[in-house]
Amino acid sequence: MMSGCVHPLRFASPKPRLYEVVARAGGWSISLNGACTRPFRGRRAAERIAKTLQRQADALTDKPKRHVIIMRERSRGGAAV
């Protein structure tokens, strides 16, 4: 490999971020790749923040905008129901 040349497969494009609103024991949380925020009391507040985060993530990756937030509930143990 020549100095200064970048191999085309060396840098992978970033994975798309998909923020979810999930029901938890203390309220509604925003989840990304299994990591959750502290619970919000209201579902609307969590949805509003998730939409804002999704809009910002889409702007960073220059991908088509996604307007879908997946809603799912979690049991107290953390496993998906």
Image (cartoon, rainbow, N blue to C red):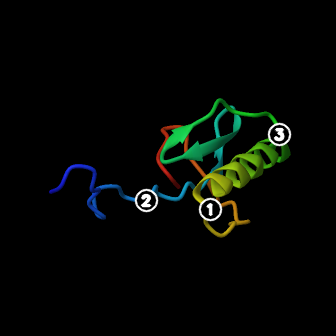
Q: Are marks 3 and 1 in contact (CB under 8 Å)?
A: no
Crowd around label 3: few <14 · some 14–19 · many ≥20 (10 Å): few
Q: Secondary structure at mark 1?
A: loop
Q: Secondary structure at mark 3?
A: loop
From the image, state whether disc 3 or disc 1 is nearer to you. Answer: 1
Q: Secondary structure at mark 2?
A: loop
Q: Are marks 3 and 2 in contact (CB under 8 Å)?
A: no
Q: In the rendered view, does 2 fall on the left or right side of 10?
A: left
Number of numbered discs overlaid on the protein picture: 3
Q: In x, y percent, where is residue 59?
A: 68, 55
Residue 42: mark = 3
Residue displayed at 15% across by 57% down: 1
Q: Disc 1 marks which residue?
A: 62
Q: Disc 2 marks which residue?
A: 13
Q: Quadrant of residue 61?
A: bottom right
Q: Nearer the viewer, residue 23 or 13?
A: 13
Question: At label 3, which amino acid type do we have?
Answer: Gly
Label 3 or label 1, whichever comes before in sequence order:
3
21 vs 8: above or below: above
13 vs 30: above or below: below
Label 1 or label 2, whichever comes before in sequence order:
2
Q: How far is mark 3 from mark 2, CA to CA?
A: 35 Å
